[in-house]
Image (tube, rainbow, N blue to C red):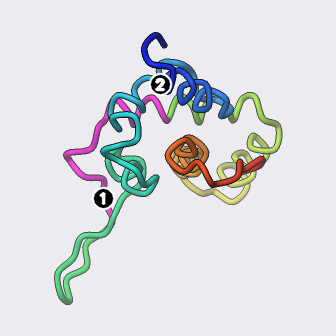
């Protein structure tokens, strides 16, 4: 990650999150304009298409869907990060197996885990926030 010193520091903080590699860190830095355009993790989750949101009007309530304008490249990178952390972290692997195999929940829990990891990735945008050790 060549370039400015601030970018390198931010990139090192992002890659320190377990499961996040340099490609994902660069994509996050580029898409958020170094956390200037998208400052909130919630906005980035919706932008990347990780979390579905409800659409409705009045009494009509539709099922939650991912926007067609979502950045599918970012979604795939975050999915790969979630898969890699499940393979590396014993606790998350047990959580994933318990929820998918035993309780029969869908495998889209990976998306949920990707969304929770974003709170750690967005720490450079909030310098006063403390580091979250366990998700």
Residue 47 to residue 87: above or below: below
The residue located at (74%, 44%) in the rendering is 92
The residue located at (25%, 79%) in the rendering is 61
The residue identified by callout 1 is 65
The residue located at (71%, 48%) in the rendering is 131
Percent x, y for residue 53? Answer: 34, 63
Percent x, y for residue 35? Answer: 40, 41
Residue 57 to residue 36: above or below: below
Most extreme residue toward the front is 5
Q: Nearer the viewer, residue 59 or 24?
A: 24
The residue identified by callout 2 is 7
Circle 2 residues within 10 Å: few <14, some 14–19, many ≥20:
some
Q: Is residue 67 magenta?
A: yes
Looking at the rendering, which quadrant does residue 82 occupy?
top right
Q: Are dots 1 and 2 in contact, CB under 8 Å?
A: no
> Considering only order in the chain, which callout, 2 or 1, is on the residue closer to the N terminus?
2
The residue located at (73%, 45%) in the rendering is 97
Residue 68 to residue 5: above or below: below
Span of residues in magenta: 64-78
Looking at the rendering, which quadrant does residue 99 occupy?
bottom right
Circle 1 residues within 10 Å: few <14, some 14–19, many ≥20:
few
Give the structural element (helix, strand or loop) at label 2. helix
Q: Is residue 86 magenta?
A: no
Q: Disc 1 to disc 2, how far (Cα)?
A: 34 Å
Give the structural element (helix, strand or loop) at label 1. loop
């Amino acid at each position: 990650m060549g370039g400015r010193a601030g970018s390198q520091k931010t990139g090192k903080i992002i890659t320190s999150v377990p499961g996040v590699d340099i490609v994902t860190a660069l994509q996050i830095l580029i898409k958020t304009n170094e956390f200037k355009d998208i400052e909130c993790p919630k906005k980035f989750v919706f932008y990347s298409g990780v979390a579905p949101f409800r659409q409705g009007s009045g009494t009509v309530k539709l099922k939650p869907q991912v926007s067609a304008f979502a950045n599918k490249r970012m979604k795939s990178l975050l999915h790969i990060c979630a898969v890699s952390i499940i393979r590396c972290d014993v606790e998350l692997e047990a959580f994933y197996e318990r929820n998918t195999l035993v309780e029969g929940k869908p495998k889209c829990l990976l998306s949920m885990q990707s969304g929770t990891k974003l709170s750690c990735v967005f720490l450079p945008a909030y310098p006063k926030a403390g580091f979250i050790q366990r998700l």
